[in-house]
Amino acid sequence: MKTYLNILFYSEGANPVEVVERLRSLGFEPVKGVHDHVYDWGRNVNLDDILQIATSVHETLKGLKVFYKLETR
């Protein structure tokens, strides 16, 4: 399974490079295409796993003035 992350930047918010580096520290990789980042679980995951990574993303992006959307499939 994979979790996809899309970021909407705000001109008064954090620099995109800072955002990418923080997300990389969680295991997300930037990609080109429909989504901005991907987290490859390498296995099937349950709801608790998804909520855990969502909480980590939320805490990592807090205060950076960006919007995000997560999608796991």
Image: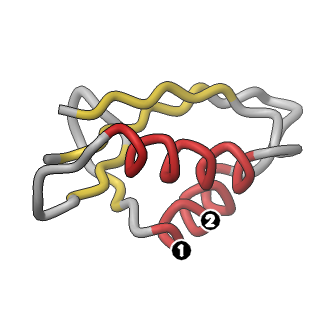
Tell me where residue 8 appears, x and y as whole percent.
59, 26
Residue identifier under label 2: 22
| Total numbered labels placed on residues in the image | 2
Say which residue appears at 57% left-offset and 29% top-offset: 68
Depth check: give the residue in front, 72 or 52.
Answer: 52
Residue identifier under label 1: 25
Quadrant (top left, top right, bottom left, bottom right) of the C terminus: top left
Tell me where residue 24 appears, x and y as whole percent.
48, 68
Q: Is residue 60 above or below residue 32?
A: below
Which label was assigned to residue 53?
none
Contact between marks 1 and 2 (CB within 8 A): the answer is yes
Tell me where residue 72 appears, x and y as whole percent.
27, 34
Residue type beneath disc 2: Arg
Quadrant of residue 42 within the rendered picture:
bottom left
Say which residue appears at 49% left-offset and 41% top-offset: 51
Say left or right for 63 vs 53.
right
Tag 2, which secondary structure?
helix
Say left or right for 22 vs 27.
right
Between marks 1 and 2, how big is the CA–CA gap? 5 Å
